[in-house]
Amino acid sequence: MKNFLGNLRIQQGVVILSAMLVSMQAWAGNVGPGHDTSTAARARPSLMARGGAEAPQFVPDQEDQPEMFGRTYGEWSASWVQWSEAGPVGQNAITDETGAFCDTNQPSRNVWFLGGAFAPHIGVDRSCTIPHDRALFYPLYEWNWIDCPGTADEALSDAEVRATLAGLTDLAGRVTSTLDGVAISSLQVLTVRTQSPRFRSILPDNSVIANGCSPPLLGGKTSRRFVDGYWVMLPPLSPGVHTLTLHGGSLGFDENGVTYHLTVLDKK
């Protein structure tokens, strides 16, 4: 168990909840100055994180998750982890201090990933230029698992790993996000929690998580992965300049804080 806990990491970026009922069709256009705020379909009150005051109820059934762009929130969270670890040390979006690698390895359409920072790290300030037609997907608080090859990790059942991740995510405290100084909850954009399906990643050489195992992980395909956390799927922003903040913390663990200065390209 000691080795297991050593493999878990907390990041800040977005938060997602499996039973959150949000529909792209429900978004009323872009979000930003001069535009109506989104009108996402309401989840049950027990599932909604209003300003991060309380953690939403955890609903593990993957079949209950709504789809966004043809994928569930859990599937998006797995893809986000794969993206966040795709860049090697020195070229990685999570360790990036300026936003220089913001556009590296992004999905080809519909969604744009934003990253938090490895805890403890407060005050990261990034500038990023993004297309006008992308929803922004990011975690505010997340724990993810990887089996270290040749260790007791591999003997744990999926259910044991899932339960441990869920217990750690239950410790989430203040998870907040603001757009242009306004809490996203005030814009009717919800913070949602989800747990991913089982997945695998392909790590580059000199991966940012290489030292999470002993001996260090080599580049190539990993073994079993899961992620549990709080996420946001923000509707496409109006063209222009926006400031987005991401903050996550928990009881007994360090906090993370990132500010994004986003330039959204005009449709033209």
Image (cartoon, helix red, strand yellow):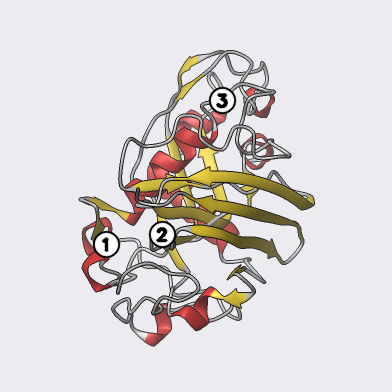
Name the N-terminal-most of marks 3 and 1: 1
Residue 243 x/y as whole percent: 62, 62
The answer for how far apart the CA atoms under marks 3 and 2 are is 24 Å
The answer for how far apart the CA atoms under marks 3 and 1 are is 29 Å
Give the residue at mark 2. Answer: 194
The residue at 41%/65% (across/down) is 17
Q: Amino acid at mark 3?
A: Gly
Assess whether mark 2 and mark 1 are in contact (beta carbons under 8 angstroms): yes
The residue at 70%/43% (across/down) is 118
The residue at 68%/38% (across/down) is 6
- For mark 1, give the secondary structure: loop
Name the N-terminal-most of marks 3 and 2: 3
Q: Amino acid at mark 2?
A: Thr
Name the N-terminal-most of marks 1 and 2: 1
Give the residue at mark 3. Answer: 87
Q: Amino acid at mark 1?
A: Gln
The answer for how far apart the CA atoms under marks 1 and 2 are is 8 Å
Vertical position of residue 219 compared to residue 161: above or below: above
Give the residue at mark 1. Answer: 65
